[in-house]
Amino acid sequence: MIFSGWVTRTQAMMPGVTVAVIIALASKFISEHYGAPSMLLALLFGISLNFLSVDERCGPGVTMSARTLLRLGVALLGLRISFDMVGALGWPIVAMVVTMVPVTILFGLLASRFFGFRYRFAFLSAGAVAICGASAALAIAAILPKDEKSDDRLVFTVVGVTILSTVAMIAYPILSQFLGFDDVTAGIYLGATIHDVAQVVGAGFSISEEAGETATLVKLLRVAMLAPVVIIASIFLRSVTTSDASGARPPLIPGFVLAFILLAALNSMVALPAPMRAIAVDGSGWFLLTAIAAVGLKTRPVEILKVGKPAAALLLAETVFLATMVALALTYLPLLPT
């Protein structure tokens, strides 16, 4: 009986999941051959096929992909993190990178008042800018209380941070040279300011091998901040959010965040076989790519446009704030050994 019910549920999910997976595959193929950001492509392809999400055959699978696969992808991000990163970077740099995350989020929460937004979009956008772009936006959206605009805010944030990351990938290496940064300092700057991991890698290695490796390491430290930020936000939201119609309250610590922490600890304490780790890391990317395709399938372009120019201005302000603060810290604070 239990097995029969599982099979029935799986069959109901398959059409929608299949559509999301096909979009993810197409996005990855085009990204690898033409250099466009795969996350942005998956989102746009999904939006172009949004009518499928209201189809009774595809709807359940699309909803599951946008929720469950998202959590699996975020959890597996933990295998990119290890405690060795702290020693490799040095405590002054670690302190600077870690401090910039809450400072940027606080700036977003305060600045949002001038742009006419409340805490949901402010935290979503600032968290995406401060931590790791689209991946952080997906994780933060998973814990925020839902309303009729939740998906639209998420889509706008993912599109916005992806575009800004792509611009930064081109502009920030030039800016680093203008500021007189050496390769190591430039790598730190790129890793601490560009939103998405792929663009960080592209920008860093466009300067040199040393800059690329440093930028990637700094970026992974920002990814590690995803867990504490989501946990603190979950605890706060649980204290101020009332039960929903079913009587449920937000969990104290989301299960996918606990899995993220456990996998990061495992990766730090045990030398996992390289093939196993590679499969898990690649799996994380595919889960997140499929999830964002499903989010696109659930989105209608007319609703995104309602978010408007103030949202774009807030995202840009948060990005400029982070870039400026990191540049000032690297220029005027004694962070690197002389």
Image (cartoon, rainbow, N blue to C red):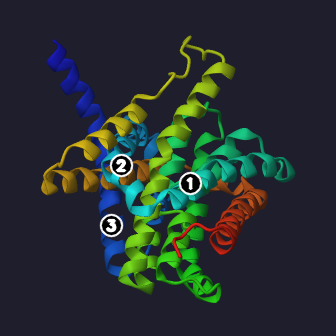
Q: Which residue is mark 2?
A: 83
Q: Which numbered disc, 1 or 3, marks the residue that appears first in the sequence?
A: 3
Determine the secondary structure under disc 2: loop
- Of residue 76 and residue 91, the one placed in the foreground of this image is 91
- Label 2 is placed on what type of residue? Phe
263 vs 196, left or right, is left
Q: Which residue is mark 1?
A: 95
- Of residue 24 and residue 230, the one placed in the foreground of this image is 230
Q: Categorize mark 1 by other alpha carbons within 10 Å: few (<14), some (14-19), many (20+).
A: few
Q: Which numbered disc, 2 or 3, marks the residue that appears first in the sequence?
A: 3
- Label 1 is placed on what type of residue? Ala
Q: Which residue is mark 3?
A: 28
Determine the secondary structure under disc 3: helix
Q: CA distance from mark 1 to mark 2?
A: 14 Å
Q: Residue at x 13, y 52 (%)?
A: 273
Q: How many marks?
A: 3
Q: Is residue 183 above or below residue 129?
A: below
311 vs 180, left or right, is right
